Amino acid sequence: MGARVVRMFRNFNLENRVFREISKEKPRAAPRHAVSDPPSAAGSEAETAVDPVNQRNDPLLTLLKSVYVESKDPVAAAEASKEVMGAKEAERRPLRFSLPGDPYGLVELTDVPKGKLTIAEALKALSSHQRQPDAWTPEKIAQEYSLDLKDTKALVEFFIPFQVQIIPPKTDSTKQIKAS
């Protein structure tokens, strides 16, 4: 109950009191403290510390004149890296196998970088290896498609495409898809 009374007195005629406070003339800032000159002993040390910095040092100047800086334009460096990339891309091999037509509306490839395969080539090589593992060994696949032997062995070992298993039904009443 006492808080209500205190709040009423605190908020009484608040707008008029605020307006009066705002319209008052602002007080002037206090003057700054006057700084006296430092003692003469400390001043001489400061002058001696500044003098070597501002003085001309002939041995250092001759050494600086002997320095020769050669800079290159970063654009020229970028072009040089593009030329190196172009040389690497020049090592391409013709496409061995491709799907008929324009799959998915993509542009038909004519050649691939060495050490790379297209999806169609990878599926063809893996299915050939799966059908005839003696004829299509990892060494032959690596040689045929210009691949690294280690990567080809890993590909053949860990990637098995289209392994279809038909599980016979348990009963005769279950329907089975017939192979045509």
Image: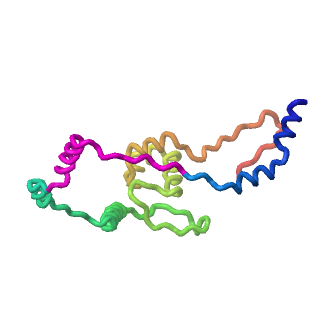
| Residue 65 place in picture, x, y as percent | 13, 61
Instruction: Residue at 85% x, 45% y: name it.
Output: 12
Left or right relative to 127: residue 1: right
Instruction: Residue at 84% x, 38% y: name it.
Output: 7
| Residue 59 place in picture, x, y as percent | 8, 54
* Vertical placement of residue 172 versus 83, above or below: above
Instruction: Residue at 39% x, 43% y: name it.
Output: 150
Q: Is residue 44 magenta?
A: yes
Its colouring scheme is rainbow
Read off the magenta span: 29-55
| Residue 76 place in picture, x, y as percent | 30, 67
Q: Is residue 90 visible?
A: no
- Quarter placement of the N terminus: top right
Left or right relative to 41: residue 60: left
- The residue at the far top in this view is 2
Q: Nearer the viewer, residue 104 or 14?
A: 14
Q: Nearer the viewer, residue 102 or 133?
A: 102
Total of numbered circles in the picture? 0
Q: Quadrant of residue 9?
A: top right
Q: Nearer the viewer, residue 43 or 3?
A: 43
Left or right relative to 179: residue 93: left
* Vertical placement of residue 73 versus 136, above or below: below
Q: Is residue 38 magenta?
A: yes
Instruction: Residue at 72% x, 51% y: name it.
Output: 21
Q: Nearer the viewer, residue 85 or 12?
A: 12
Q: Is residue 94 visible?
A: yes
| Residue 124 place in picture, x, y as percent | 52, 54
